[in-house]
Image: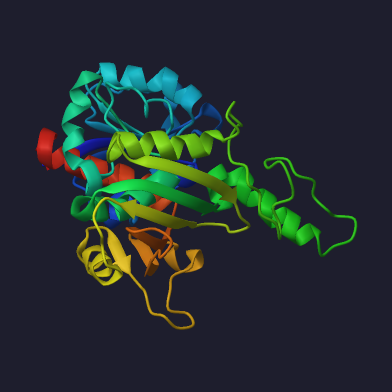
Amino acid sequence: MGYKVVVVGATGNVGREMLNILAEREFPIDEIAALASRKSMGTEISFGDKTVITKDLDTFDFTGWDIALFAVGSEATKIYAPKAAATGCVVIDNSSLYRYDPAVPLVVPEVNAEAVDGYTAKNIIANPNCSTAQMVVALKPLHDRAKIKRVVVSTYQSVSGAGKEGIDELWDQTKGLYVPGQEVEPSKFTKQIAFNVIPHIDVFLDDGSTKEEWKMVAETKKILDKSIKVTATCVRVPVFVGHSESINIETEEFLDEAEARDILREAPGILVVDKREAGGYITPIECVGEYATYISRIRQDSTIDNGLNLWCVSDNLRKGAALNAVQIAEVLGKRCLKKG
């Protein structure tokens, strides 16, 4: 016996990935509904070897449905997620709306699967920010072994993290630079993104950090350990899909790089590719379409007593969003709903 599953925002990048991953992982589904705004109603969407016709989110009745995967912005989520949850349908939300609500679990299954049990408070589970999700997957096994005190992370985040508009702007600007008179001014981003990097994601806060950087701090503490100190610099780069992170870790106990490499090789959701030779590491273009969080460049930081450096890469539309949501649904089914 399977579940009745709703994908909200099915015509967007993340919504389409949710449908792809549900099919790929053979999630036990008896019935699937793909929802979108009224203007996209009737759009045909692929679901495995089937085609699903999108329905109108505004008029959809969630009564009798088991799980709803939300891939719409916070404003739409604020309206429709409580309506779905009130009917008994469990919402797994990819927006930032509920991430910092103490009554809503914020879950990365490889890190804190047990937190799913707290869904009953509001019938809602939150999916973390894409940059946080891959980082905590890498940190968790090292934290279990040597207790992490402090993390310094610099991110190199792809334009797909800004949605279809981000992808289109990089594409159009790149083409425009080669055709005189067809240059494209920045619209989605604050400066030209083609052949450039922008140290600014989301809005600036009073302390000079951006909200994206604040998210990584707050979410790491909620998911992994509130005592960990985190400082982040988040940068948008001209890559279509795949977020990369340079992570510096300080632990309470000494952890040798060789042991760290072995620990990460055995950890769930991680693939280590770490050869000290040309090409012996993973770049974002190589992780597109993959489930794993890839770790490379593992090495001791000799400037502190208990320090490690590593390079972390993942498909942000998958582990950073759609895959993590489906994994939450899998954990929810096994631990709580137990129908499939």
Residue 107 found in image quarter: top left
Residue at the location (23% across, 55% down)?
253
Q: Nearer the viewer, residue 220 or 85?
A: 220
Q: Quadrant of the C terminus?
A: top left
Q: Nearer the viewer, residue 216 or 28?
A: 216
Percent across and percent down for residue 148 are: 29, 48
Task: Give the answer, above or below, for where 99 lies relative to 279.
Answer: above
Residue at the location (70% across, 57% down)?
196
Percent across and percent down for residue 213 are: 50, 39
Q: Quadrant of the N terminus?
A: top left
Q: Left or right? Give the position of 129 relative to 329.
A: right
Residue 50 seen in this snapshot: no
Percent across and percent down for residue 286 are: 46, 69
Residue 329 found in image quarter: top left
The colour scheme applied to this rendered structure is rainbow
Q: Nearer the viewer, residue 260 or 133?
A: 260
Residue at the location (42% across, 37% down)?
217
